[in-house]
Amino acid sequence: MKKQSIPKRVQDLLDRMHSSRPNTDDGGISRRGFIGLSAAAGVAATVGGLAVPPAIAQQAAKNPDVEAKNHAPQGLNEKTIAELQGEMKSGNLTSAELVAFYLERIAKLDRSGPRVNSVLELNPDAAAIARALDRERRVKGVRGPLHGIPILLKANIDTGDRMQTTAGSFALAGPPAPQDATVVTRLRAAGAVILGKTNLSEWANFRSFYSSSGWSAIGGQCNNPYALDRNPSGSSAGSAAGTSANFCAAALGTETDGSIVDPGSTNGVVGIKPTIGLTSRAGVVPISHNQDTVGPFGRTVADAAAVLGALVGLDSRDPRTQDSSGKFFTDYTQFLDPDGLKGARIGVPRQMFGFSRQADAITEAALQTMQDAGAVLVDPADFSDLADIQSFVDEFTVLLFDFKQDVAAYLATRVGLSVKTLADLIAFNNANADKEMPFFGQELFLAAEETDGFSDPAYQQALANKHLLGRQNGLDGVLDQFNLDALVTPTIFPSAMTDLVNADHFLGDTSSPAADAEYPLVTVPAGSTNGLPVGINFMGRAFSEPTLIKLSHSFEQASKQRRAPKFFDNLPPESDGFAGHNVALNRGMRSLHRPR
């Protein structure tokens, strides 16, 4: 592939990435430093060694029920969307009662009590909408599986109502968006109740290499409901944490590289990152039109699949959706098959193991579960150019160029804001540094501002390289070579401590091949270590969501690894999932892979 000429500030950041080394504290920013380690180094831990240690059991005994202590309702916890519909059909539950249930839990556990801090704003019209949908159910019947179901939205998704769309930044606060994002219009048409907006990594974590995932200027730090001193991962942190904590039936997040699947894993829920173009991005604060996508979180694969079906379809406001013509389904629950693993050929890219011994051990157990369920494992099934994907050069270049142009196009749709360009946003942050930049800066904004536009040969070459790496030399290549239905990898390491001073402690994840290719991922809970959930990623070809849903649902039914969080204040030091592990401080990819 050709070497492209890129702006000096961008090249300086890339040089720092490539000069950094794992296990150092020199401020290096290589996002993928640990991912290339051999699998042999990572799987030494045994599954038996991941049982909850005595320190965790002792803490649970001392604090047996945080929810009861805070007088939070629990009767509908872990109910699936289908079960909630059954309750409403029988007359045992109304949508208004369900909304009240979630609002009370948010008040007792998110706004006070343990303070997960996952919800930025509540919809003042939610109760009225629920009552109207209850009347409609009685008079006309139901619209579909989401009728009366409360759903939270990441705060970078427009709603043309009394709520705001801020992406966590005060720069976008004030006038609401003039109309719904297309995905919101479709949720409303399906009968969903938009319950509120969730906290997130500000600007979908595309502002600084030194950020703390889940932190925004408006919302502060979102916390992991399994251990509140742990990071929820980003950037769809609040959507994943809120779904896990039973603050909603499901939620929407966005992903550019890892920001659905990573928080899905660390918060113990299912996350579906759709193929680019399957769901519309119109009305969503962007990073990159090449990589941004909107997808659902659910506590089960079935719940996430039910929401996905309501989101899809062609949209004149987002030309990329034309790619999905003839390839989308309005009902993805039809692909739920408990025997879906039987005869499936699953590839295991061993190059993508090794960044976390705990995640590796859990994935090994998951692979055995798949094999026991009838899957054929092809192990190893490795990429030819994984090192180039993980170098992040081409993806990073594309994202920087895209962001400058795409954010200006989005700002042009907003009425009454003082900011119209990326330069305006940079100036706003400088003028409001005490609120916007108390912990980290805006290096990514500054680097993106130096880019010259989509006609720049450097951009065109990086985009071509990115597609080649992700597709022919990446996912399509390995799936074709080994005649595979999907690949399975660890999603990300167990949740690290939140660190606003030194930024995220990032060991590695596995979302980048799908990000480069612009292809789908599904993460599903696979186990836990020291009380912290760990998920696995199913990855496949473009528009292979039906296959990934079938496989992940079958694994979910065979393994049953979802566990509701207990809202512990912390994990005892001796139970730390990173004991004996060198932690790489990643400042590079962290922000891009929790993005959007």
Image: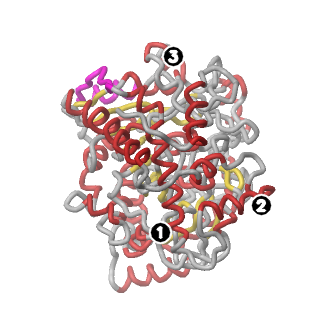
Q: Is residue 367 magenta?
A: yes
Regarding residue 504, the answer to whether it shows in the image is: yes
What's the mark number on residue 283? 1
Q: Nearer the viewer, mark 2 or mark 1?
A: 2
Residue 353 found in image quarter: top left
Distance between mark 2 and mark 1 Cα atoms: 26 Å
Q: What is the number of callouts on the image?
A: 3
Looking at the rendered structure, the kind of residue marked 2 is Asn
User: What is the secondary structure assignment of the residue under circle 3?
Assistant: loop
What's the mark number on residue 19? none
Magenta range:
364-384
From this view, report whether residue 524 is shown above or below residue 167.
Answer: above
Q: Is residue 466 magenta?
A: no
Q: Which residue is mark 2?
A: 432
From this view, report whether residue 148 is shown above or below residue 575.
Answer: below
Looking at the rendered structure, the kind of residue marked 3 is Ala
Name the residue rendered at 66%, 25% in the picture.
Answer: 575
Q: Which residue is mark 3?
A: 45
Q: Which sits in the foreground, 491 or 473?
A: 473
User: What is the secondary structure assignment of the residue under circle 2?
Assistant: loop
